[in-house]
Amino acid sequence: MIPARFEYQPARDLAHAFQLLAQGGGEAKLLAGGQSLIPLMRFRLATPRALIDLNRIDGLSYIKENGDLRIGALTREYEVETSPTIRGRYPIITETAAVIADPLVRNMATIGGNLAHADPANDHPATMLALRASVVARSAKGERVIPIDELFVDTFQTSLRPDEILTEIRIPKPAAKSGGTYLKLERKVGDFAIAGVAAYLALDESGRVKTAGIGLTNVGSIAIRAKKAEAALVGNAPDDKTIAAAAAAASAESEPTTDLRGPAEYKRDVVRVLTARALRRAVARAKGGS
Amino acid sequence: MAETLYPITLTVNGEKKEAQVEGRMLLVHFLREQLGMTGTHIGCDTTSCGACTIIFDGRAVKSCTVFAVQANGRTLRTVEGLEQNGKLHAIQDGFHQEHGLQCGFCTPGMMMTTVALLERNAAPSEQEIREAISGNLCRCTGYVNIVKAVQHASAAMREAKREPVAAGRA
């Protein structure tokens, strides 16, 4: 299948990209890894008038710790997956990157694209919700930091303005006694999740849950923060009873639809089971285990 | 409306190539139709099967999911570049010796993926090989002989590297 015609515009730097975006008048799309956009263009589900290629811009691919963790938007999933920094301190992100599509796709796909595409089936959104991350949006006018809860508006829609480019992801420094994991049930490698659950929590001195973050993949029009499940955890000892209550709450908060990956009822139960498993592992990691 | 053509210069299997391409031309179509290098196959056209895998600046990627114009200034390797001076690459020999193919359609992609794997991990475990080829579909072999082929190549490549050292010691 051949995509529709478009004008190819390689951006030299961010300033050039902002200029091209302004010229595009809302009909230009940004090309990062292209692993979602190019398939959509082949099916002609996306027919942008112009494609602004960000891949020639230096300085947008990095992983650095600066108190918090900062990941450049153009960092490939392969780099995220294999980064010792990320594996050591944020194994939940390593686990998320490792189950995206397949290794060949991950060699091109970028973490910024995974978020900015705002597909509820993408995996980073749930993990970033659990980690209470934020993203940096830059434009010719300056930059602003968008909390992850305010980024996803609807399927394929973010709160990024037409003149903005997502340039960086910021993840808070891990709290003491904290841990998390990402679990995804998929029919086969390369498929989107039947459901996915990201869980991240921190324990206080007495071993009770101090903070909790739970994000759900592909069970709604956007990645969902399971707020009631988080509330069921905070202040309580993370025992079997608490975890079961949180898992039931997450299941109730999910909004799956029936499709080829299964009936909605089944997916809701997958959310319950994955949430409980993810929480047990998160608790073990918060206590220093793996 | 006339299609705009973009000039590109790239290196394919060590040879410099210059061409004019449409913006929307996929890299796999460029290789097959404009350069006449049909060793890279088109399988699913939906970023699923990996038959079109090539090595793009050192990384194995699906050439149906990259535009040709993105390859401007880049270095590509395709299956046609594996054999050197009439001598098969160790991975080709591995697929031959271990019967790592039946219909052979997925084989170019399998070999490019696993060449890239062996270049960054000379001695992968079976699990690592299986993970590396998880984006390459084979409908014939059940993958068992493909894994053996990669192990065969891995052993041969490590042996070939050791030889000069052993000779030096002798």
Image: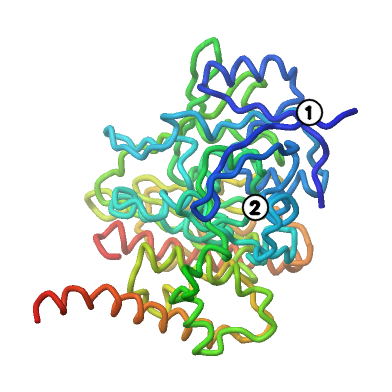
**Quadrant of the rendered image containing residue A249:** bottom right
Q: Nearer the viewer, residue A212 or A101?
A: A101
Is residue A227 something one can see in this rendering? no
Q: Nearer the viewer, residue A234 or B10?
A: B10
Q: Is residue B9 left or right of residue B21?
A: left
The residue tagged 2 is A121
User: Is label 1 or label 2 in front?
Assistant: 1
Q: How many marks?
A: 2
**Type of residue at label 2?**
Ala
Question: Disc 1: which chain?
Answer: A
- Position of residue A55 relative to residue A290, above or below, is above
Q: Can residue A69 be seen in the rendering of this structure? A: yes
Does dot 2 land on a helix, a strand or a loop? loop
Q: Residue furthest front?
A: B85
- Same subunit, tags 1 and 2: yes
Q: Quadrant of residue A51?
A: top right
> Which residue lies at the image location 69% right of the left edge and 43% below the top edge?
A37
Q: Is residue B89 above or below residue B34?
A: below
Tell me the SS state at disc 1.
loop
The x and y percentages for residue A66 are 28, 32
Q: Which residue is mark 1?
A: A49
Disc marking residue B41: none
Within 10 Å of the Cα at label 1, are there few (<14), some (14-19), or many (20+) other Cα atoms?
A: some
Give how far across and how far down residue A219 sits, in percent.
67, 55
Residue A258 sits in quarter: bottom right
Q: Residue at x 67, y 15 (%)?
A: A22
Residue B125, position in %: x, y? 37, 78
